[in-house]
Amino acid sequence: MPTITITIDNQRIEAKPGETVLQAARAAGIEIPTLCYLDGHEAGSSCMVCAVKNKANGQFIPACGSRALEGMEIEHLTDDVREARRMALELLFSDHLGDCLSPCQRICPAQLGIPALLKHLRAGEFGLAAASARRDLALAGILCRTCQRPCEKGCRRSDHDESVAIAELVTHAMDTELAAGPPRPPQPPAARPERVVIIGAGFTGLSTAWFLAQQGYASTVIDEHPTPGEAIRSAFPELPAGVLDAELDLLVRAGVTFRCGTRIEGGAGLDALTEEAAAVVLATGSGTADQAAGLGLALADAVLAVDRDTMMTSRAGVFAAGRALRPKAQPVGRVADGKALARCIHQFLTGQPVRRPPKPFSVFMGRLMDGEMPDFLQDVNRSPRVGGEAMALDVTRAIEESHRCVSCNCAKADVCKLRQLAIDLDVNLNRFTSGERLRFKRNVEHPLVCFEPGKCIRCGNCIKVAGEHQEELGLTFIGRGFDVHLGVPFSESMAAGLFAAAKAAVDACPTGALTLRESPAVGKCDIDMNAPMKTDPPNHPLSSADESDMPLSNE
């Protein structure tokens, strides 16, 4: 069969007659981003995220709907093409409604994956809930007992009555785990040869050691007290007996060693540590300018000078965080610092650019309008908050409390193509925003599918899938102009439009507009509920475009 030769970013590739630029590029291993394109179906060319530039006339064309022509020269990765794609995304975000991450998770300094944890609790999966907490938190068994609970201050349920008892639910999961036996440390991908020395066995130092262990790094924690964690014990004498010891034992089983009763004196002591280890962490608590100067480190405004982006001191390979810089930092903030330090150290030791992790990308819809809360209260426990000893000692009541969560996160944030592209292209969410937003709606009339129209980008993929499955009614676009929206013909319900195509429509949706309901009712839809769901992935949500090598965030 004769072929056509085209050029993409100066790379000559061959295409079959009739192929689009997108198909030819993918066949050659060149990935052009798409949102509205669905393999095996006619291109809609509605989102323009696959825009490329035709060098012959300088025009931007949709790669998914443009035929490859002999001699065509295409630009794909140039700055102006990226800007065109960025603008297309920013236009989509101008009326995109719905939080990527829930307010409770966004406000947590340690970015605990609260929605995923509560989902496990609702299913009675206390072991998985505890494992989810440990992936995001160091000292998870004691942290929520010492935390100021900012997550509960941000809980959207409090707009209706009271916040969900998040801290007590996490504590319940950790206590249940401990009651079943010693917790198991996570298995790192592979052991690494570099060793890290951490000075200070408080929240920051132990958190750094925990997250380094998850990446395969062995660490030694040095502390001047005779036993580790003494500063925590003295600051929180009300902690139940044994819980801190269990956390320290878990660190030891994860590969952390302790050198207690040792004080590092002056620059010579720091010199010795830098000879011993590939990186050194100062997590010494609130110190003085004289102590920092005595270690031979630079000062700024009479405090230890640390680069905000790299978390590194004036000496390469020596990092610092926690109360060494912010004497009034709360425990959860110090644990978050340790988590960020582990990432920076990993980057430093692997030769990557060192950069403190940015805040996770998330659309935030803000305070609710009048009349929006009832949509959030569908399918949830409307009973008052249960807390204190009554919940801590009762599994049933803990599960009931977890059902009070109104699920204001996006169930597909981990796999949302719109969100991933926004991260990749560094979009400005406010570029085309008018300041007014749509009214939030959540449609749960379908026994298996939840539909949030504010997240729909009108790509038409679900319409194509419904047609492919020969649904009797299916889905269609209704209205004109800016009023176009997805619906079922003849004003029928979503349940009447989707039967056999329900799960396929969810999979085809590139955003969180269509998701599978967590606890579906029995209906006529022909769906294997035991099949793997793309909406329930095993990893955490993305917090930055290069997070894949440091999985320290939520499911």
Image: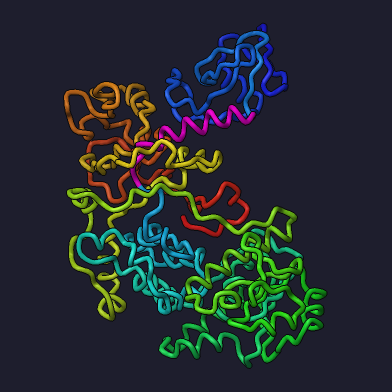
Which percent across, then down, holds residue 252?
62, 78
Is residue 449 in view from this perspective? no
- What type of secondary structure mainly makes up the magenta span? helix
In this orientation, which residue lies closer to the viewer: 317 or 472? 317
In the image, residue 340 sits, relative to residue 95, either above or below, namely below
Magenta part of the chain: 78-98
Going 31% across and 54% down the picture, which residue do you hit? 407
In this orientation, which residue lies closer to the viewer: 182 or 480? 480
Give the mark count: 0
Question: Image quarter for residue 229?
Answer: bottom right
Going 43% across and 79% down the picture, which residue do you hit? 146
Which percent across, then down, holds residue 59?
56, 16
Question: Image quarter for residue 206?
Answer: bottom right
Going 50% across and 78% down the picture, which residue do you hit? 328
In the image, residue 222 sits, relative to residue 325, either above or below, namely below
In the image, residue 33 sits, relative to residue 252, either above or below, namely above
- Check the picture and name the quadrant holding the N terminus: top right
In the image, residue 267 sits, relative to residue 300, either above or below, namely below
Going 66% across and 15% down the picture, which residue do you hit? 73
Is residue 322 in view from this perspective? yes
Which percent across, then down, holds residue 249?
57, 81
Question: Image quarter for residue 98?
Answer: top left
Q: Is residue 397 magenta?
A: no
